[in-house]
């Protein structure tokens, strides 16, 4: 059912259109850019799926900023303070005592400014592919593209949306471009653009008190990972989630991974209540990585391969939990999954089950197991043992399970498998050669 449009009044007398969907803890979401038509957004399948998924667990609030969409159009003030007033008006109209705040791209600085000025109102802050200084986003490439606004508004919006969402976005980019043209005039867009270049909230970052998650896609062509890393490092206690992909659209290109990171941050994942603490000290580590992923991407195409990889990732994490292990939710290099166990037998049994789970998808895994001391930070583990486990996996053949001598010793009598000596290997980044063994038997 399409949400009902409501209106809030800002401190400077501007009418702001918004809607709510669902019930529960409030989640207030800013626009991505100075554009939007709430009713039209609902007709875009990807955005509707995003909204409906969010609203399953909470009350979702979405609004059109001043001068665009269904909000009051005859506006000349697009300053940062004016944009913050829009957000304030919606939160005050709904009398929200506190809420989770999601700030995207051009409106990330708006969310940061609000969170710094109203620390008592923001329970959690999530920042999507954004920045603290306008100059970090409005690069010479962006300036070049913006020159099209006055010459060919339609061409500009089409080019912008394909650049923003990724050139594989297809019809979704076209729908978003049409939405922009419906929601704002070229003149208003230019005015908002000139104003946004001046957005500067770097000085406010240390004043953000809410738990903060900075989300960013690694392959974005228009804003670098360094910007996201710097942003997260300047907000006290902020977490950084780096996701794969080249799209700036949170509702496209593996949006399930975006929501999984959000659920984990908010403690709302399916396993949140039952998820065990990752160990500190001695642990057995299993690293599983898709074999020949580059060649498979070329053969299947990026979208098809990523779909298979996502399906396998979900399956592997389920297998890990069923085997008594804990999948690490933090960043892992490549197309890999890292899991932590308390026994070598569990890790070996799990590796064999992971291998079996990959076969129906036509994929093979490199599988490596090592044991050693780890350091826990949040939902991730660090230390030399983690690096060794990853290098052992890289040394394995497709579908092969390799273990270190340490794991062989621990599992020799408890694991119902045999071990084939593969000799010593010089592993990249590891000082001493490691004696490796291939697991034989056990299925």
Image (cartoon, rainbow, N blue to C red):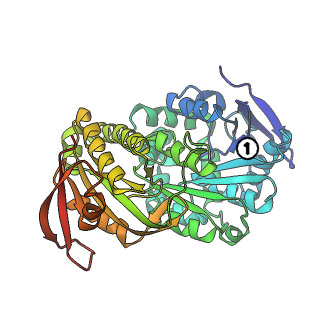
Q: Is residue 356 left or right of residue 328?
A: left
Task: Judge by depth and name the residue closer to the eye, 434 or 362.
Answer: 434
- Position of residue 178 relative to residue 350, above or below, is above
Would you name the residue on which mark 1 appears?
Answer: 66
Question: Residue 195: x, y in percent?
Answer: 66, 58
Tell me the quadrant of the picture where the N terminus can be found: top right
Total number of numbered labels?
Answer: 1
Tell me the quadrant of the picture where the C terminus can be found: top left
Q: Residue at x 48, y 39 (%)?
A: 256
Q: Is residue 103 left or right of residue 149?
A: right
Tag 1's secondary structure?
loop
Name the residue furthest front: 413
Question: Residue 116: x, y in percent?
Answer: 75, 63
Question: Residue 20: x, y in percent?
Answer: 73, 32
Task: Judge by depth and name the residue closer to the eye, 292 or 269.
Answer: 269
- Position of residue 169 relative to residue 220, above or below, is above
Q: Residue at x 75, y 45 (%)?
A: 75
Residue 54 visible in the current orientation: yes
Residue 320, quarter of the rendered image: top left
Question: Residue 410: x, y in percent?
Answer: 31, 62
- Position of residue 327 relative to residue 387, above or below, is above
Residue 221 visible in the current orientation: no
Task: Judge by depth and name the residue closer to the eye, 85 or 406.
Answer: 406
Q: Is residue 305 left or right of residue 398?
A: right
Name the residue furthest top: 1
Q: Residues within 10 Å of mark 1 (few under 14, many from 20)?
A: many
Residue 162, quarter of the rendered image: top left
Q: Residue at x 86, y 41 (%)?
A: 95
């Amino acid at each position: 059912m399409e949400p009902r449009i409501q209106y809030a009044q800002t401190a400077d007398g501007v009418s702001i259109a918004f809607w709510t969907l669902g019930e529960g803890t409030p989640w207030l979401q800013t626009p991505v850019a100075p554009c939007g038509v709430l009713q039209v957004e609902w007709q875009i399948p990807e955005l509707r799926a995003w909204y409906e998924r969010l609203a399953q667990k909470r009350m979702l609030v979405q609004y059109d900023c001043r001068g665009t969409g269904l909000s009051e159009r005859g506006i000349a003030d697009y300053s940062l303070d004016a944009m913050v007033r829009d957000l304030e008006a919606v939160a005050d109209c709904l009398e929200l005592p506190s809420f989770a705040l999601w700030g995207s791209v051009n409106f990330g600085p708006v969310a940061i400014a609000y969170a710094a000025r109203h620390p008592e109102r923001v329970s959690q802050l999530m920042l999507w592919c954004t920045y603290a200084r306008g100059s970090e986003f409005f690069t010479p490439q962006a300036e070049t593209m913006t020159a099209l606004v006055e010459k060919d508004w339609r061409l500009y919006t089409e080019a912008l949306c394909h650049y923003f969402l990724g050139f594989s976005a297809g019809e979704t980019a076209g729908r978003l471009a049409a939405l922009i043209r419906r929601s704002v005039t070229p003149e208003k867009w230019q005015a908002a653009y000139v104003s946004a270049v001046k957005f500067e909230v770097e000085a406010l970052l240390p004043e953000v008190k809410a738990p903060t998650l900075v989300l960013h896609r690694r392959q974005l062509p228009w804003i670098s990972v360094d910007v996201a890393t710097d942003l997260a490092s300047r907000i006290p206690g902020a977490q950084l989630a780096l996701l794969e992909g080249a799209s700036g659209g949170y509702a496209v290109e593996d949006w399930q991974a975006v929501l999984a990171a959000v659920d984990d941050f908010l403690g709302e994942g399916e396993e949140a209540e039952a998820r065990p603490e990752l160990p500190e000290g001695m642990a057995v580590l299993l690293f599983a990585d898709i074999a020949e992923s580059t060649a498979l991407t070329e053969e299947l195409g990026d979208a098809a391969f990523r779909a298979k990889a996502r399906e396998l990732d979900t399956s592997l994490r389920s297998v890990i939990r069923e085997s008594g292990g804990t999948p690490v939710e933090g960043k892992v290099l490549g197309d890999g999954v890292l899991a932590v166990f308390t026994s070598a037998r569990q890790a070996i049994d799990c590796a064999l089950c992971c291998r079996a789970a990959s076969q129906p998808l036509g994929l093979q895994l490199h599988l490596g197991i090592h044991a050693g001391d780890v350091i826990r930070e949040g939902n991730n583990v660090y230390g030399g043992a983690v690096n060794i486990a990853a290098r052992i996996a890289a040394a394995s053949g497709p579908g092969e399970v390799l273990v270190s001598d340490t794991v062989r010793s621990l599992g020799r009598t408890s694991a119902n498998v045999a071990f084939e000596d593969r000799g010593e290997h010089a592993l990249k980044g590891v000082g001493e050669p490691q004696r490796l063994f291939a697991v034989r038997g056990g299925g």
